[in-house]
Each structure stands twice: as structure tokens, then as C-alpha cells.
């Protein structure tokens, strides 16, 4: 079909977009410095602090697998939207509290993974939070991307390479490529293989 560009004129919250997500219904979500926008077949809807979001700085988005969207933001908080309403807030606790939620991901076991811009990545299950930082073997504490492979292992993109987390084990050079440690990873995509 035809390509359609969206700007503030067409209803986007801002012209600079930091994160994009296509949910299971096919709606497109765009996170900006001025809020969140959902583009569906019949409407463009904006969400902001006025709708209950903690911040208008939307840094990351993730499909929760059950019809909702996780929203990572610059307010050391992750919000959960269902049916256009914020139904849950997760305040990031130290050591994550001072950082932006640069990447969020809901895995197949419904655990929430939150990457930050300086304190690694956290895996949240109920009230329990496990931290993976450079102390645990991560290549860097600035996390920009999170993905899950077909076997349930998590792949974490950082400012200085990629890590694979399988259970509680961190593998720093999973691709066995020494050049990867000098490369910033901004996005990850898992193929069908």
C-alpha cells in the first residue's frame, strides 16, 4: 500500500520520535519528547501527562503480549497502558532510579525487562528485581535494545557491544566477534532462525 508520513500536522505528539512499536492489533505507537501517539486505522490518539503518564518523554515501548503497552520514560518509571488508560506504574528503585528507561521488553514468561542509560538492565517478576550490570558481566551499563530469541534467551544491546542473558548467566561475546565490543548496538531484531 501507499506510504503515509505522520507529523504533528497529522496528529503526532511531536516530530522527533524516539521509539516505535506495532502492537498485535496492528496499531502503531510512537514515543516522543511530547508524549505518546497511537495510530490506528480509524484514528490518531495522543497520550500525555494529562492522561496519567508520569512523563511526556517517552523513551521506549513494548507490547505486553496481552493487549497492553509498556511505556518507558525519562521519569525513572515504567507505565502500563491498557485500553488507553494507565493501569499500573512501576517506579524504578535504586540503582535504576536515577536513569531513563531506554529499553523495555516483556518476555514470553511475562517478565518485564527494563534497560537504562547508565545502570544496566533489570528483570522484574512480581516484587522481585534482578539486576544485570557491568559487575555481572554486561559489556556496558548503557542499554539501548532488548530482544528475546526462540529459545527464551535475552539479547541486550549496549553502548559497547551485545550480551546474551540465559537464565542468570551473562555471556559478553555471544557472537564470538571481538569487533562487536567496540560497537554500540542501537536496535535488535530476532529472525525466524
Image (cartoon, grey):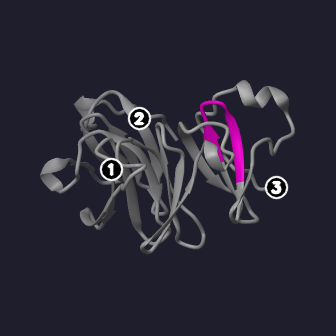
Q: Residue at x 18, y 57 (%)?
A: 52
**Which residue is nearer to you in this view: 14 or 107?**
107
Q: Which mark is residue 193?
A: 3
| Residue neighbourhood size for the residue with mark 3, other residues' Cα within 10 Å, grouped as few (<14), some (14–19), many (≥20) | few
Gap between marks 2 and 3 measured at Cα: 28 Å
Horizontally, residue 180 falls left or right of residue 1, namely right
**Which residue is nearer to you in this view: 31 or 133?**
133
Q: Is residue 16 magenta?
A: no
Magenta stretch, residue numbers? 156-164
Q: Which mark is residue 46?
A: none
Q: Residue at x 69, y 46 (%)?
A: 137
Q: Tell which circle, 1 or 3, labels the residue nearer the N-terminal end.
A: 1
Q: Residue at x 28, y 37 (%)?
A: 12
Q: Residue 183: horizontal and vertical position, in percent?
A: 69, 26
Q: Residue at x 84, y 30 (%)?
A: 178
Q: Residue 86: horizontal and vertical position, in percent?
A: 25, 63
Q: Which mark is residue 18?
A: 2
Q: Residue 22: horizontal and vertical position, in percent?
A: 48, 52
Amino acid at each position: 500500500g501507499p506510504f503515509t508520513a505522520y507529523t504533528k500536522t497529522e496528529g503526532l505528539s511531536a516530530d522527533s520520535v524516539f521509539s516505535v512499536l506495532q502492537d498485535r492489533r496492528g496499531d502503531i505507537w510512537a514515543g516522543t519528547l511530547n508524549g505518546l501517539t497511537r495510530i490506528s486505522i480509524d484514528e490518531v490518539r495522543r497520550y500525555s501527562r494529562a492522561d496519567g503518564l508520569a512523563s511526556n518523554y517517552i523513551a521506549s515501548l513494548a507490547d505486553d503480549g496481552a493487549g497492553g503497552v509498556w511505556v518507558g520514560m525519562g521519569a525513572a518509571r515504567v507505565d502500563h497502558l491498557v485500553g488507553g488508560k494507565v493501569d499500573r506504574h512501576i517506579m524504578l528503585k535504586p540503582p535504576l532510579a536515577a536513569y531513563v528507561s531506554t529499553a523495555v521488553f516483556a518476555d514470553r514468561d511475562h517478565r518485564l525487562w527494563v534497560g537504562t542509560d547508565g545502570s544496566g538492565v533489570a528483570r522484574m517478576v512480581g516484587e522481585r528485581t534482578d539486576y544485570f550490570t557491568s559487575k555481572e558481566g554486561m559489556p556496558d551499563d548503557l542499554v539501548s535494545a532488548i530482544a528475546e530469541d526462540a529459545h527464551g534467551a535475552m539479547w541486550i544491546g549496549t553502548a559497547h557491544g551485545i550480551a546474551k542473558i540465559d537464565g542468570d548467566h551473562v555471556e559478553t561475546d555471544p557472537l564470538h566477534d571481538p569487533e562487536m565490543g567496540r560497537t554500540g548496538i542501537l536496535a535488535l531484531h530476532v529472525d525466524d532462525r
